[in-house]
Image (tube, rainbow, N blue to C red):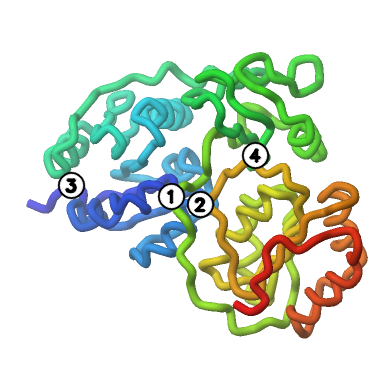
Amino acid sequence: MNPLTADAVMVVHGPEIFDAGDVGWLIDLLSPREVLVAGVMARTAARESGLPVTCTDERPSVVLNALPGRVFLVNRGKTPESGRIFGEIIASRLEEGRGLIHVEASSRTVYSWNCADDALAQEIAEKTAFTLTPAESTGDPHDGETREIRGCIPGEAVFVNGIVIGTATDKTVVLSTRGGSLRAISGLDPKPHGFEKLLRTGIPDLKAAWCKSGMIRSAPPRPGMVRASRAGRIAVIDHCGHTLYQEIEDEEVCGVLAIGDDTTAVCGHICSHAGIPVFGVVDGDGDGIVEPGFAPGSVVVRVTHGRDDDVGREVAATRDLETTSWEEWVEETLRSLEGRVRVVVDRRDG
């Protein structure tokens, strides 16, 4: 009799489970028929791993709802508590009557949320020697105007839609859009500039927003191949590094203009393995959300007069974003900014 896992799809969330080696171990042990990866940094870690997986831009709940048949989710939370909270949130967002099997590597637990497929959950628990734990989600508590971000560690960065809006001061951060504005109710030391960046596109839908806390990846990037072409289009990423893959999948992109400290860090990290150079414009207010790394040819400048937003947008508006030479584009851009910035990362010599 074929094992049930051989007929199941494994959905992987987050980079840590790749970095810890869990994904390769689980593939060898469970032999799922397909492995789907959800999340930006998970995608980066997946590519670095070289494992036979398929990456998707969709969030885990969307991927799970779209899959028929047997499916299970694997994750490694930063703590066992945050891992369990993550599983409960995903379970609460699935279609009515659909359970969730959640393999949580941080606690070596197989959660069977909301009466999931007991036979499959039992088989996974037996093969992994993880503890099988039935669990019930309480439903999505968000009313559309209030959002709790649970599992925070005081002192770590808090994100909404990829933008850092402050630092956690408690295990739970509460946000609200009541009254037509976004504000922190509790658990957050706000970063005003972060709120400003987030609100540029309007007040976010808190129920649908991507919210998290902590580093988006703790492991350093693994350098990959250098992209051969240094001619083509320069992609502009302005304070939303989580959208980067939509750009760098385009083979005509020869480099990235990243605006903002955290955006530059994320772009540098992701593009390091892809071999794509980055020109980053920063002003020194980064939150240390990811280990740095930059592909050969990258340059990061720190603004000495003004803000990174203004200088970066000026570059995007005044410089030609099509080039026959990335190196020449960088040199000309540096000349145009002379006296207003200083170079803080320089990988033009590799």
Q: Earlier in the sequence, mark 2 or mark 3?
A: 3
Q: Earlier in the sequence, mark 4 or mark 3?
A: 3
Q: Write the residue at 62% across / 35% down.
A: 159
Tag 4: residue type? Asn
Instruction: Tell me if mark 2 has few (under 14), some (14-19) or many (20+) residues whose alpha carbon lies within 10 angstroms of its own.
Output: many
Residue 317 in sight: yes
Label 2 vs label 3: CA separation? Answer: 29 Å
The reply to whether callout 2 and callout 1 are in contact (CB within 8 Å) is yes
Badge 1 marks a residue whose secondary structure is loop
Q: Which residue is mark 4?
A: 161
What is the quadrant of residue 126 in the picture?
Answer: top left
Q: Which residue is mark 3?
A: 4
Q: Looking at the rendering, in which quadrant would you find the C terminus? A: bottom right
Q: Which residue is mark 1?
A: 15
Tag 2: residue type? Met
Label 2 vs label 1: CA separation? Answer: 6 Å
Q: Is residue 17 left or right of residue 149?
A: left
Instruction: Tell me if mark 4 has few (under 14), some (14-19) or many (20+) residues whose alpha carbon lies within 10 angstroms of its own.
Output: many
Residue 91 in sight: no
